[in-house]
Amino acid sequence: MFIIEEHIYFWGFLVLPVLLLMFLSYVYWKKKTQKRFAEIRLFKKLAPEQSSFKSNLKFIVLTLAFACFVMALVNPKLGTKLETVKREGVDIVFALDVSKSMLAEDIAPNRLEKSKRIITEIINNLTSDRVGLVGYAGSAFPQVPITTDYASTKTFLQSMNTEMVSSQGTAISQALDLARSYYNDDDQTNKVLVILSEGEDHDGNAESMAEQAAEEGIRIYTIGVGTERGDPIPIKENGRIQSYLKNDAGETVITKKDTETLRKIAKIGNGSYIDGTSTSEAVDEILDELQKIEKTEFEAKQFADFKSKYQWFLGFGIFLVLFDILLLERKTAWIKRLNLFNERTKDED
């Protein structure tokens, strides 16, 4: 497992496009100046040993060296010692709706991004609980199993989008069914399922599946995102709205938040419904609910010792700088003798 000690130095990579632009500007200026001095054919005769390839290679080498120095400053660390520790908490599975309706922008920036933000803030406030992540639309899929690795969970969360499921629609029952398999009964931890959706249920089996989950001791909380008045589903290209999703009759689809369905599911699951309009209020409310649930002791494996690996990047960066210094811009004799490009010699002329 890798961790990053100094994230701020990642900004150093923004210098790379600037260096590339400066190099291309230099090449353009150089060619323009050479044309003023002599034709390219004559210039090659005046400077036959000059290698344009090596000039480009030297730039690539220096760029790689700079990238290595940035990585050395970032100081990645590798976990070297895995140990088992005892923790107290609950198992929380987040079920995120990734259907097309979650692209509606009746709640800024859109329903999906709002849901991601809520989940991220909840995880940021957890300490010893385990979390899992499920995605669903017309069908459900596992994204992150139950884990104490919050950083990885948030990374996978941000990658979730509406293209991850080919079957569209909103089948909350599918998410409930998959989430049930996430929990380990041997640990005897308290189980919590948090569903984030606009609440539209296209298969109608959500309530019966919620009953089965409740019988297994899973407490269900629902967070509704969107508005009751609804909004069309935008179809974007390059970040701009090109049109809106239409049904088979050619009418624009208006997706609305179904608060009533979400309330019923939460009530059946011995939990509660939470309005997701305000991120901070939704996070505070769910955290208050989690505080009321009894914590259970469980064993978890985690890395206890991390070793810095900056020296590898620093060493390789120094090697590249030295290589660049020794790399001359004139042609290499032995490569020239290979005549890889079948260039004609003076005798052949």
Image: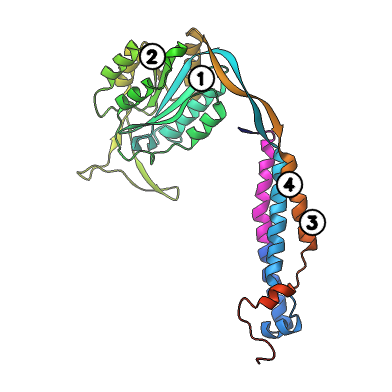
Q: Between tags 3 and 2, which lies in front? A: 3
Q: Quadrant of residue 174?
A: top left
Mark 2 is on which residue type? Answer: Ile
**Type of the residue with mark 4:** Phe
Disc 1 versus disc 3: distance between alpha carbons? 48 Å
Can residue 220 be seen from the camera position used here? yes
Q: Position of residue 49 (x, y in %)?
A: 75, 77
Q: Are marks 1 and 3 in contact (CB under 8 Å)?
A: no
Of 291 and 155, the residue lying toward us: 155
Residues marked 1 and 4 touching at CB (< 8 Å): no
Instruction: Provide the residue designation for mark 3.
Output: 322
| Pointer 3 with pointer 2, Cβ within 8 A | no
Q: Secondary structure at mark 1?
A: strand
* Magenta stretch holds residue 28: no
Q: Which mark is residue 130?
A: 1
Of callouts 1 and 4, which one flags the residue occurring earlier in the amino acid sequence?
4
Give the residue type that dot 1 points to: Arg
Q: Residues within 10 Å of mark 4 (few under 14, many from 20)?
A: many
Q: Which residue is mark 2?
A: 218
Q: Which amino acid lies under the numbered mark 3 shown in the image of this protein?
A: Leu
Label 4, label 3: how many angstroms apart (C-alpha)?
14 Å
Q: CA distance from mark 1 to mark 2?
A: 14 Å
Q: What is the distance, in whole Å, between disc 2 and disc 4 at their CAs?
A: 49 Å
Of 198 and 72, nearer the camera is 72
Alpha carbon of mark 3 to alpha carbon of mark 2: how far? 61 Å
The local secondary structure at tag 2 comes to strand
Quickly name the residue at label 4.
69
Q: Earlier in the sequence, mark 2 or mark 4?
A: 4
- The residue positioned 39% from the left and 39% from the top of the image is 164
Disc 1/disc 4 C-alpha distance (Å)? 36 Å
In magenta, the rendered stretch is 4-22
Q: Earlier in the sequence, mark 4 or mark 3?
A: 4
